[in-house]
Amino acid sequence: MVDAWHYTPGPMALAQRTVLIAGATGALGSAVSLACARYGATVVLCGRNVAELEKLYDRIEESGARQPAIIPVDLEGASDTDYQTVSEALAGGLTVLDGLLHIAGTLGQLSPIEHTATRQWRRALSVNLSAPFFLTQACMPLLKRSPDASIVFTLDDKTRAYWAGYGVAKAGLAALAKILADEWDPPPGETRNLRVNAVDPGPLRSKLRRAAYPAENAQLPADPAERVAPYLYLLSEASRDVNGMLFCHGQAARAL
């Protein structure tokens, strides 16, 4: 298997591929969005802040990459109707979707379970777990039309004291990724057209990291642009036979 953390794409490794990126305007999301566009993908930018989406759209256009698209959605408060709107918007502009990257995330509240506020618990589970589930469902019809579709989840193992809703949601997201990978692993002899994998990028310079570790030297975590390679690899033809794997920074790839 290719070393995903040192994967170097060809100049147009993602040409002719359309990729939706949830959480596109965050620190990691914007770095991945720009990288996908740089290597030829048509990116669909998904997030709640329209002004930030438009800024990222302009950066991609100014780079000379393919024209992106924008789908605003508030993953915290999204309803069934909102996800239906996303599905209809995608179907109205696309015939297939080749990639879905789940990068959106929110910290919620760091506290003992005993003292976790109900609203913060619900917010953490909504953005970090429920939204990826419903957004994947909304995108599935178009993903199934692709000859080689890739779903990538962003994980973070925080199943320890005080991580409350965030830790629970990320553990649930890992389970969701594994279940999806199992469901789409075809019987021997059949061709796979959808693969599901996950990336744990490790500590990154981001608002979420600063909220969790306010006393940390801001320069210690990695620049998100240094951790985009696994996402590019998992979207590319190079990983076509890779399914149900977790790529955790600093560790060997392993099964979900």
Image: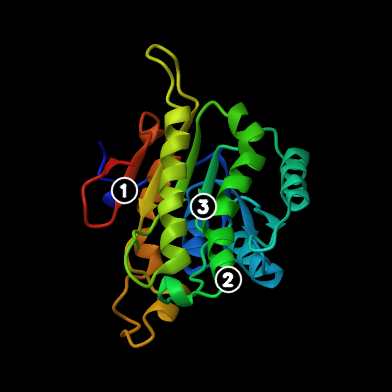
Residue type at the position of mark 2: Thr
Question: Mark 2 or mark 1: which is in front?
Answer: 2
Q: CA distance from mark 1 to mark 3?
A: 14 Å
Choose top left, top right, bottom left or bottom right for residue 181.
top left
Q: CA distance from mark 2 to mark 1?
A: 32 Å
Question: Mark 2 or mark 3: which is in front?
Answer: 2
Disc on the earlier residue, 1 or 3: 3
170 above or below 113?
above
Percent x, y for residue 126? 59, 59
Badge 3 element = strand
Percent x, y for residue 92? 78, 40
Residue indicated by mark 1: 247
Mark 2–mark 1 CB contact (< 8 Å): no
Residue indicated by mark 2: 118
Which residue appears at 65% of the width and 34% of the height?
Answer: 142
Q: Is residue 38 visible?
A: yes
Badge 1 element = strand
Percent x, y for residue 112? 40, 75
**Nearest to the observer: residue 29 or residue 104:** 104
Residue type at the position of mark 3: His
202 above or below 1?
below
- Crowding near the residue tagged with mark 1, few <14, some 14–19, many ≥20 C-alpha atoms within 10 Å: many
Disc on the earlier residue, 2 or 3: 3
Which residue appears at 72% of the width and 43% of the height?
Answer: 87
Residue type at the position of mark 1: Phe
Percent x, y for residue 59? 59, 66
Residue indicated by mark 3: 102
**Outermost residue toward the front in this view:** 114
Which residue appears at 48% of the width and 35% of the height?
Answer: 180
Q: Is residue 10 visible?
A: no
